Image (cartoon, rainbow, N blue to C red):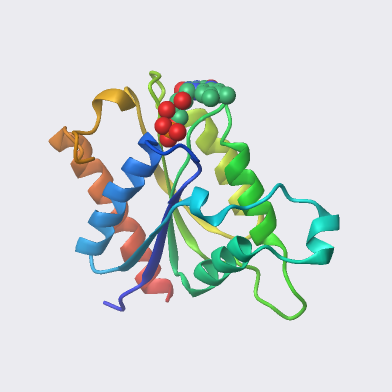
């Protein structure tokens, strides 16, 4: 198998984010499945709110870094909190910045295989936000896997070390990560 490059990130800026914990677990499974994996924390990128005026002056360093990582990647593991039935503004803002294409450059999200996950304290696990992020990413050329995972009761899903407590849930996350790695390696 061609070893695909996968980046893993969440749409949360919260220090103890459940979604970042989930994506970290998914990243570990992707590594076991043979991918090269890099976990990115959105808050470390310090991405300002997008404005075309700001963009005309300079592209922020965090955006440059994100675009570079996206361009190198074959696959993306992405988890987002659900805020008011959608995905987070922080993630939309990062997508908006990264979707901007310099002349002659390949759009950063084009042909990237994406696996979507979410977790929330609520009963639907952030499922409603995933429909929106799927729409947005499909619209800018990403290949979003049909399978996705929304994990309810986030407060009870992980142990102190961030490991998934339930073997059944661990199997589901592992299967999704394996699917991403398999598809990304074929398209590489
Ligand atoms: C503004 C706001 C809106 C929210 N709306 C929802 C929602 O629609 N559905 C839901 O399941 N949880 C909602 N929540 C709760 C989040 O799921 C919860 O804060 C979660 O821990 C955020 O993910 P994180 O831990 O990865 O940061 C909302 C939280 C905030 C701050």
Res 84 quadrant in image: top right
**x, y (%) of residue 159?**
18, 33
Left or right, residue 49 beside residue 186: right
Choose between 112 and 161: the one closer to the eye: 161
Residue 109 visible within the image: no
Q: Is residue 133 above or below residue 53?
A: above
Residue 180, quarter of the rendered image: bottom left
Is 158 left or right of 112, judged from the image as shown?
A: left
Q: Residue furthest left?
A: 167
Q: Position of residue 102 (x, y in %)?
A: 74, 74
Q: Residue at x 68, y 57 (%)?
A: 97
| Residue 152: % across, % down | 34, 25
Q: Measured from the top left, where is residue 44 in percent x and y?
A: 49, 53
> Which residue is located at x 71 percent, y 65 percent?
59
Count of residue discs: 0
**In this view of the protein, can residue 45 be seen by the observer?**
yes
When the figure is inspected, residue 23 is found, relative to residue 89, above or below; the finding is below
Quarter of the rendering occupied by the C terminus: bottom left
Q: Residue at x 20, y 38 (%)?
A: 164
- Quadrant placement of the N terminus: bottom left
């Amino acid at each position: 198998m061609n070893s695909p490059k996968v980046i893993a990130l969440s749409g949360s800026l919260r220090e103890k984010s459940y979604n970042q914990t989930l994506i970290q677990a998914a990243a570990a499974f992707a590594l076991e499945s043979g991918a090269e994996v890099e976990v990115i924390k959105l808050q470390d990128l310090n991405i300002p709110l997008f404005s075309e005026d700001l963009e005309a002056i300079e592209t922020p360093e965090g955006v440059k870094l994100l675009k570079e990582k996206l361009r190198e990647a074959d696959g993306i593991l992405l988890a987002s909190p659900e805020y008011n039935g959608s995905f987070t503004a922080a993630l939309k803002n990062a997508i908006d910045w990264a979707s901007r294409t310099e002349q002659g450059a390949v759009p950063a999200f084009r042909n990237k295989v994406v696996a979507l996950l979410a977790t929330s304290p609520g009963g639907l696990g952030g499922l409603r936000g995933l429909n929106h992020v799927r729409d947005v990413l499909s619209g800018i050329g990403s290949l979003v896997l049909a399978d996705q995972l929304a994990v309810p009761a986030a407060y009870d899903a992980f142990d102190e070390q961030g490991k998934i407590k339930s073997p059944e849930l661990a199997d589901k996350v592992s299967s999704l990560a394996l699917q991403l790695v398999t598809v990304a390696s074929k398209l590489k």
